[in-house]
Amino acid sequence: MEYLQMILVLGTLFLFAIVGCQTPVQPIVSHKLVVTGNQHAVPLYPDEQTYLHTSREKQEGGVVGVVGDVKQNLTAKQIDDQTPVEVVTSDDNGAVITVTDGPMKGATGFVAKQNVN
């Protein structure tokens, strides 16, 4: 009888272990991308240096500012507002993120600080 109870307990524990391993673990803190100002989508740059260089050009105005706008459209992917993301690293300028859901799932890049909630 003890042998049967022990097998039953071990089988139940084994079942819980299998079910527990099949359930994906969600991050404790979830983040979303948010648009600011007159934006319709959040630009996702390949890296922080590209973001810094493009934003400096856009701030200069004139022809250089127009070049910065064109460069942003060519180098940055446009990610929809409220897209769920995971923050990989962050600093004073923004964050390296990975998109966790939606059509761009798996995309990784740099976004400005004001675009991460």
Image (cartoon, helix red, strand yellow):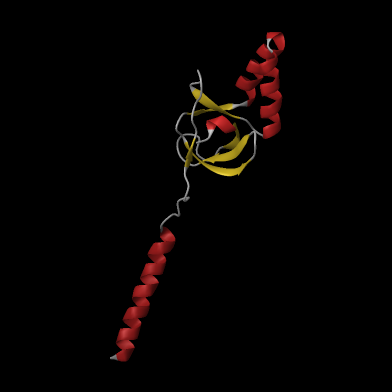
Q: x, y (%) of residue 84?
A: 46, 38
Q: Quadrant of the N terminus?
A: bottom left
Q: Give the total number of marks visible in the rendering.
A: 0
Q: Is the residue 53 above or below the residue 28 in the image?
A: above
What residue occupies the far front of the structure in this picture?
A: 92
Q: x, y (%) of residue 51?
A: 66, 28
Q: Residue at x 58, y 33 (%)?
A: 113
Q: In this rendering, would 112 be left or right of 4? A: right
Q: Quadrant of residue 95?
A: top right
Q: x, y (%) of residue 63?
A: 70, 9
Q: In this rendering, would 65 be left or right of 3? A: right
Q: Residue at x 46, y 29 (%)?
A: 81
Q: Quadrant of residue 94?
A: top right
Q: Is the residue 108 above or below the residue 56 in the image?
A: below
What residue occupies the far top of the structure in this picture?
A: 62
Q: Is the residue 15 above or below the residue 46 in the image?
A: below
Q: x, y (%) of residue 6?
A: 34, 85
Q: Residue at x 64, y 25 (%)?
A: 75
Relative to the observer, which residue lies in front, 103 or 53?
53
Relative to the observer, which residue lies in front, 25 or 6?
25
What residue occupies the far bottom of the structure in this picture?
A: 1
Q: Is the residue 93 above or below the residue 8 in the image?
A: above
